Image (cartoon, rainbow, N blue to C red):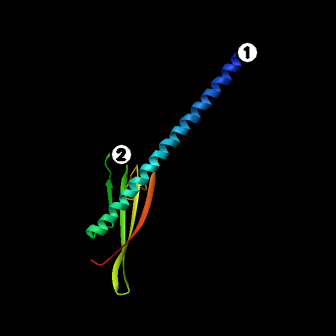
Amino acid sequence: MATAIFILVVLAALAAFLLSISNLEQGRSALDVQGAKAYQAARAGVEWGSYRVLRDNVCAGSTSFALPAGLSEFTVTVQCADTPYTEAGSSGNVYLITATACNQPSGPGCPGLRGTYYVERQLQATVDKRGP
């Protein structure tokens, strides 16, 4: 009888351990998916900022927006800074576009809440535009 109880206790402990490992791996997998989504959201922000610079000649200081559909839980903050230059008689601007995407925004640049599944990605791009 004692041996049977011992075996049951060991098997229950083993099952509890395997269950906790399974839950840990599911959490890691969820964070991995959220990280990939955050990267795509930040990339969309860089592309939006580049489009605004190249098509509309607009370099707004800082703009935040939400994304539709599969990236709707992310907020993107796009910052743009320009530096004018003259080179070999040609003038233009170099724009530094920084996009920060996070899933729990709390003010500009997502500095706030750091929950269990907080994810943030930041991408930068440099755009050179000459002439009008």
What residue sits 33% from the left and 82% below the top?
A: 91
- Name the residue carrying label 1: 2
Which one is in front, 94 or 20?
Answer: 94
Residue 126 horizontal/vertical position (percent): 40, 69
Q: Is residue 98 above or below residue 131?
A: above
Task: Tell me the amino acid under the disc marked 1.
Answer: Ala
Query: Considering only vertical position in the picture, is 122 above or below 24?
Result: below
In the image, 20: left or right of 58?
A: right
- Count neighbours of disc 1 (C-alpha within 10 A) and say few if under 14, some if 14 to 19, many if 20 or more: few
Whether residue 116 appears in this view of the structure is no
**Residue type at the position of mark 2:** Gly
Where residue 14 sits, quadrant-wise, is top right
The mark lying in front, picked from 1 and 2, is 2
- Tell me if residue 36 comes above or below residue 2 in the rendering: below
Query: Marks 2 and 1: in contact by CB < 8 Å?
Result: no
Q: Residue furthest top?
A: 1
Q: Residue at x 37, y 50 (%)?
A: 74
Residue plotted at (60% across, 28% down): 16
**Residue at x 36% of width, y 45% of height:** 70
Is the C terminus in the top left, top right, bottom left or bottom right quadrant?
Answer: bottom left
User: Taking the image as drawn, is residue 49 in sight?
Assistant: yes
First in sequence, mark 1 or 2: give its number.
Answer: 1
Picture coordinates of residue 28 (x, y %)? 52, 43
- Give x and y (percent) for residue 127: 38, 70
**Residue 7 % position (x, y):** 69, 20
Residue 104 relative to residue 31: left or right: left
Q: Which residue is mark 2?
A: 70
Q: Which mark is residue 125?
A: none
The residues bearing labels 1 and 2 have C-alpha atoms spaced at a distance of 55 Å
